[in-house]
Image: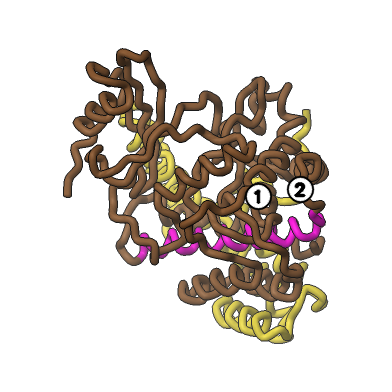
Amino acid sequence: MTVDVRAGLEKLAVRLGGEGARVTEAQRLSGGASMETYAYSFEGPRGAERLIVRRRNAPFDPANGRAVSLATEAALITATEANGARVPHVRHVCDDRDGLGEAYVMVRVDGETLGRKITSDPRFDAVRPGLARQCGEVLYGIHRTPVPEGIDLKVVDGAFELDRYEEIYRATGARRPILELAFQYLRKHIPEPVEPVLLHGDFRNGNIMFDSEQGVAAVLDWELAHVGDPAEDMGWICTNSWRFGRPDRPVGGFGDYADLLAGYVAAGGRAIDLSRVRFWQTLGSLRWGVMCLTMYLSWRDGANKSVERPMIGRRVSETEADLVVLLEEGL
Amino acid sequence: MITHPKTEELAESVRLWIDEIRPTLDPRNAFLARVAANAMATICRELTQGPAAEANAVAGMAGVLGHDGSFEDLNAELCARIRAGELTRETPGLMAALTTMARDQIAIDQPNYRPEGTPAPAG
């Protein structure tokens, strides 16, 4: 079914803004293969609103991969907002009346998401030293949030993730000794189980909106939300592939481990061992390496013939270069 | 192999041409053209640095495994023995061999990547 997005957004302006409201902006921003994002504004009898629309343009298949539905995403954002996490405010979750398919609308947050700007642009020099601590605080706001009634999220722990990614790796047929050693090493160092909590699931520099005065403005991109070890979200933002050229600053290329952990505790969270974060960070590099292999395979097997795909396949070696150092140092 | 031009020079000429036309492209194609130019640069580096990298890898793996062999055979055996738990990070020579392999490969794939453990840039 083809959806007329323009017409849908006009109709939506009236629904949200009142009779006579008209669209003043509807610009498609970046987006993945199946996800569209629009900068969307309208003016109506009750005033003007600046929003973001996120919509899926392909049928959602809950059995495929890890992503959650957009309605779930919206519900989680709303629930974490109520617990003090800095997230965009969800304005509206679309239903059949809107004719936009699976979509929701949030209030636009201004700021910067480009990882390299956060790590290196002088505009962020003033706030940068405080960002890791703020990330710890905002993470606790997410982790303390009970999963809303009626929402079923995947539960994940270290052993589960290792099994999952090793299965994917074996299926690729690739033979990479460093990835093999990382699987073996991590299996011997799986942390003790903890009470699982709500996780963002993709908490990294690039998925966080930063303001050059306030620091963390909003945590975005909730489609990989799940339930698991709080250290998983911390380890992912410490994975070197998301430090944008500043490996000397382990948290996102902008901060130190101690500040991230201290911010979490200051917000009310339980103290978390650095070695636990390093387990998930190492698994993060391994996981990203395996993901790069699968992106190459999607090209080899004809699913996506873009030149980007085989080049992402060559990013496996960046995770190997990180993993040899992590394996040498130990957790 | 003929030398006028060398294979890497062919690849380099394509990369230069892609860079030349990039400004005329729409944003999506300009992005893809940048990726394509990077791919040509990777091909160049693999052609010039690949043989030495492979020789280093073969020497390193042969040292750990205790016998000679082709890259493919040694790599397959190394993977199998790590998976079986026979070789670990404590095995003498293993981490050194893997570190060399990782360093040589990132130099081909992404020479500007700054791996874990790299100190802060000067200045």
Above or below, B83 relative to B28? below
Q: Which one is in front, A272 or B17?
A: A272
Crowd tier of the residue under label 2, counting other residues whose Cα lies within 10 Å: few below 14, some 14–19, many 20 or above = some
Report which colour depicts chain B. yellow
* Residues tagged 2 and 1 counted as in contact (Cβ below 8 A): yes
Q: Position of residue B68 (x, y in %)?
A: 66, 84
Q: Which one is in front, A194 or B60?
A: A194
In the image, residue A71 lies in the stretch drawn in magenta: no
Q: Would you say A6 lies left or right of A239 here?
A: left
Q: Position of residue B26 (x, y in %)?
A: 31, 30
Q: Which amino acid does label 2 sit on?
A: Gly
Q: In which quarter of the image is the C terminus of chain A?
A: bottom right
Above or below, A81 relative to B11? above
Q: Residue at x 50, y 55 (%)?
A: A149
Q: Which amino acid does label 1 sit on?
A: His
**Disc 1 marks which residue?**
A143
Chain with brown colouring: A
- Residue A282 in view (yes/no): yes
Identify the magenta region: A272-300
**Disc 2 marks which residue?**
A269
Above or below, B23 relative to A311? above
Q: Which one is in front, A251 or A158?
A: A158
Q: In which quarter of the image is residue A268?
A: top right
Q: Are marks 2 and 1 on the same chain?
A: yes
For the residues labelled 2 and 1, the Cα–Cα distance comes to 8 Å
